[in-house]
Image (cartoon, rainbow, N blue to C red):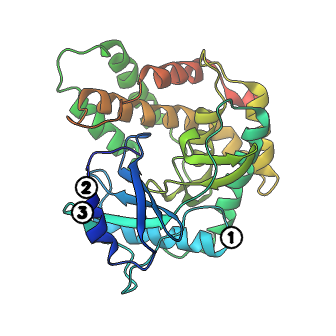
Amino acid sequence: MAVYSPISHDELLTFLTQYNIGELQSFEGILEGIENTNYKILTSTNAYILTIFEKRVKKEDLPFFMNLKNHLANKNFLCPKPIPDNNGTIINSLKDKPCVLISFLTGSKAKVITPHHCKQVGKNLSLLHHETSDFTEERSNSLDYTQWKTIFEKCQTIPNHNYIQLCDIIEKEFFFLKNNWPISLPQGIIHADVFQDNVFFIDNQFSGLIDFYFSCKDYLAYDIALTINAWCFDEKKILNQEKLQQLLAGYESLRELKTDEKDSLSILLRGAALRILVTRLHDQLFHPPGAYVTPKDPNEYGNILTYHQHNNIKTLL
């Protein structure tokens, strides 16, 4: 989340006349994250989040995202619920960009990650996979191997930058993954972005998951791999075995991993690391002018990828 599309008080007042949510009391931009513009809005009745979708989110994908969140919220999964306007419309427009108003989740991200947090994250990721097993809509993964390659090729058009050594690592990893990516693993709806910024806690208890705008149908174990990389590494980018064990224990408390998923997890972890590495590299090299958010350092995931290249997680399972 970030603020790429500034809005004025008057613009917001005009926009909110479409909704029956009370009178506007205050609003502020949310600077964390990198994908969309977000504002926290406080009205006389409640708090809400206004999301303005920037270039990475396609308008034709928005119905899938909104219907998925409605599906989960209706099953009491802790996530934001889209708010319809006075005509029952969920997806609207602001600043000539698509936007939605969603419910506000209380809680905050964990400041210090413990194995206790990891176990709850694993359990709720498993719950999400279970509760979407009857969700009938599908969306292909728009950030798969082919798209990673396209993003990286764009990065290679910049001749001189501070991440040249990372590019050598990335090129070799593409070749490895092309020849080793698993096939025929269990699939379903995945969140694909269970990062620490997107998980809320109250008194160290899970209180909600946000930012579903990478959700798609893919390998369930790939979702686990993305989550392990985000939650189970220490500051030196060494895998914390206790956090890993607790995250997997939380996940398997609801759904047991199959043998082929465990066998493939090391490869999936490398792919999950490469995905974040190439997107962070892109965001560094093509940072939008005027954005208030600082892009994240790709070296973090370069180090995570290097760890996985030299360590097979199967020995820890």
Q: Nearer the viewer, residue 138 or 79?
A: 79
Picture residue at 32% right of the left edge, 58% below the top? 52
What residue sits 36% from the left and 30% below the top? 295
Mark 2 = which residue?
8
Few, some or many residues within 10 Å of mark 1 (<14, 14–19, 20+): few
**Residue 245 image position (x, y, % from top left):** 79, 35
**In-image side of 181 versus 53 (left or right):** right
Task: Give the CA separation, mark 1 to mark 2.
Answer: 35 Å
Question: What SS does tag 1 mark?
Answer: loop
Residue 234 image offset from top left, x and y in percent:
65, 21
Which one is in front, 63 or 216? 63
Q: As drawn, is 104 to the left or to the right of 233?
A: left
* Residue 257, percent from left and from top: 74, 50
Secondary structure beneath dot 3 equals: helix
First in residue order: circle 3 vs circle 1: 3
Are the residues tagged 3 and 2 within 8 Å (C-beta)?
A: yes
Query: Which one is in front in this view, the residue at disc 3 or the one at disc 1?
Result: 3
Please tell me whether residue 61 is drawn above or below residue 35 in the rendered image: below
Q: Assess disc 2: are there few (<14), some (14-19) or many (≥20) residues with their C-alpha within 10 Å of its C-alpha.
A: few
Residue 287 drawn at (x, y percent): 25, 32
- Residue with the mark numbered 3: 11
Report the front residue among 196 and 86.
Answer: 86
